[in-house]
Image (cartoon, rainbow, N blue to C red):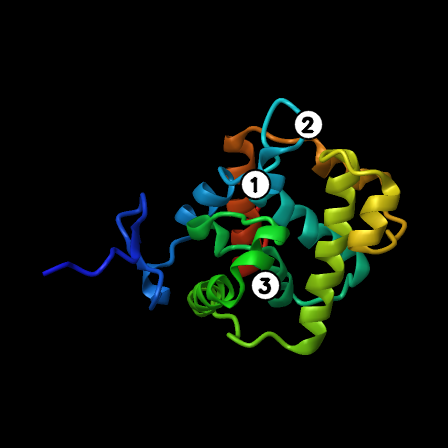
Amino acid sequence: MATAPRAWQRMLSGRRLDLLDPSPLDVELEDIAHGLARVARWNGQTSGEHVFSVAQHSLLVEAIAEHFSPNTPAAWRLAVLLHDAPEYVIGDIISPFKAVIGDAYKAVEQRLLAAIHLHFGLPVIRPAALQRLIKQSDRQAAFLEATELAGFTRDEATRFFGRPAALPKSFLSYLEPWPIAVSETRFAERVSTLRNGPAPV
């Protein structure tokens, strides 16, 4: 008798995360930071000595969101930072391939995101205003990454990601790909800051 295919992933923390029925009790920040720092955006087709990781992308998106909406509460900024967190388990599938796969991928992604939100004390259903902020900031980040790292022309990037907003030149510092350890540490530290407030000096 054939056994059912394995639908769980063993994490380095020791947790066993079920992809079909993920529990917030099996979500750990150290696993998320570790995984996202090792997942490459754009399938690794970016310039630079290091991959441009999903962890670094997430920090860029959160910084852009804070620029667009400086009074956004910390909990919302945490949700922005975690918008791609399921990719620590399932990887970063490029948008054209997502369109080919269809709803099956989206269902797994949404279940994982719900478990992650519950773990961090965030609502499973994001308010519409937060959804808009995430989408706007994510598209702005994609434009910057596409033109600065992934070989897109500005016309191509504008067609796919929309017209870019004017952002301070300081944002370019997020587009120099970091070593894995740097991405992992900065992502974990930012999550902790948004959850608990700045560390005492």
Q: Amino acid at mark 3?
A: Ala
Q: Nearer the viewer, mark 3 or mark 1?
A: 3
The residue indicated by pointer 1 is 186
Q: Secondary structure at mark 1?
A: helix
Q: Residues within 10 Å of mark 1 (few under 14, many from 20)?
A: some
Q: Amino acid at mark 1?
A: Arg
Q: Nearer the viewer, residue 88 or 186?
A: 88
The image quadrant where one finds the C terminus is top right
Q: Secondary structure at mark 2?
A: loop
Q: Amino acid at mark 2?
A: Ser
The Cα atoms of the two marked residues, 3 and 2, are separated by 28 Å
Taking the image as shown, residue 3 lies to the left or right of residue 140, namely left
Taking the image as shown, residue 166 lies to the left or right of residue 99, namely right
Q: Which mark is residue 77?
A: none
The image quadrant where one finds the N terminus is bottom left
The residue indicated by pointer 3 is 79
Q: Secondary structure at mark 3?
A: helix
The Cα atoms of the two marked residues, 2 and 1, are separated by 21 Å
Earlier sequence position, callout 3 versus callout 2? 2
Q: Vertically, is 54 above or below 102?
A: above
Q: Nearer the viewer, mark 2 or mark 1?
A: 2
Residues at marks 3 and 2 touching, judged by CB atoms closer than 8 Å = no
* Res 132 → quadrant: bottom right
Q: Nearer the viewer, residue 20 or 177?
A: 20
Residue appearing at x 42%, y 67% in the figure:
115
Taking the image as shown, residue 39 lies to the left or right of residue 24, namely right
The residue indicated by pointer 2 is 47
In the rendered image, residue 44, in percent from the top left (x then y), is placed at 59, 34
The Cα atoms of the two marked residues, 3 and 1, are separated by 16 Å
Q: Vertically, is 109 above or below 175?
A: below
Earlier sequence position, callout 3 versus callout 1? 3
Residue appearing at x 62%, y 53% in the figure:
95
